[in-house]
Amino acid sequence: MILVTGGIKGGSGKTTLATNLSVMRARKGHEVLLVDADDQQSSAEFTELRSEEMDDPGYTCIRLDGKAVRDQVQRLQSKYDEVIIDTGGRDTTSQRAALTVADVLIVPFGPRSLDIWTLERVEALVADARAINPDLRAYSFINRADHQGSYNDETREVLTDSEQVEFISPTLGDRKAFAVAFDYGQSVVEYTPRDKKARNEMKRLHDAVFETVPK
């Protein structure tokens, strides 16, 4: 599978998702290629830190930009079980190139108006990508969900109504554990002290993407 963590808004959690999924797939014995196609290079920096702490990060990480994302992923994909591409939070050439070869796009949305207002632009991006890659499947989920209040339900209602991007129910809460684990070059499922809620949320999202989503 070639999976893209993408979207239009920066800071929505794409890199946290990409790095956690890469680690989790590698821990299950899969050969994983993590492609950092984001100008901020956070996935690459995470992997460098992980390599310093663990010697072997468990997966391969490369940095690509622009049309090279498409060309190099096509060349390399046969060597890996999973290719996970972390794109920036903008409508970039890199993201569009990734979507031309992707099987799945996953878009995190926070329960805030600024995030939800980007949905129409994400739908347009998906529509453009499907003109080249008609089999592309696009999914959204709620990230950094509030612990209480109505924002989560309102966001879920908006996302569910999309005709271009299918909503999946697993939700990641607004939990410090995700950021702390990232700072240590670890997935939240391996970091100690353990945050059981954060671990279970990430595991449910992983299972929804890799076990429930049609191949």
Image (tube, rainbow, N blue to C red):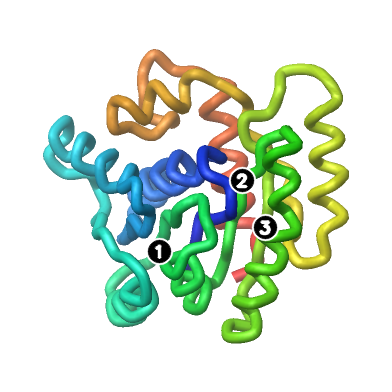
Q: Which mark is residue 82?
A: 1
For marks 1 and 3, give the one nearer the viewer: 3
Residue 9 relative to residue 73: left or right: right
Residue 67 in the image, given as x and y percentages of width and height: 36, 76
Residue 123 in the image, given as x and y percentages of width and height: 72, 64
Pointer 3 residue:
139
Q: Residue at x 52, y 44 (%)?
A: 10
Q: Residue at x 58, y 47 (%)?
A: 9
Residue 8 in the image, given as x and y percentages of width and height: 58, 53
Label 1 element class: strand
Q: Is residue 80 above or below residue 16?
A: below
The residue type indicated by label 2 comes to: Pro
Q: Which mark is residue 161?
A: none
Pointer 2 residue:
108
User: Image quarter for residue 152?
Assistant: top right
Q: Is residue 10 above or below residue 86?
A: above
Q: Pointers 1 and 3 in contact (CB under 8 A)?
A: no
Q: Residue at x 51, y 50 (%)?
A: 89
- Tell me the crowding category of disc 3: few under 14, some 14 to 19, or many 20 or more residues within 10 angstroms, Cα based: some
* Mark before the other along the chain sequence, 1 or 3: 1
User: Image quarter for residue 215?
Assistant: bottom right
Q: Is residue 75 above or below residue 15?
A: below
For marks 1 and 2, give the one nearer the viewer: 2
Residue 59 relative to residue 172: left or right: left
The residue type indicated by label 1 comes to: Glu
- Tell me the crowding category of disc 2: few under 14, some 14 to 19, or many 20 or more residues within 10 angstroms, Cα based: many
Q: Residue at x 17, y 40 (%)?
A: 51
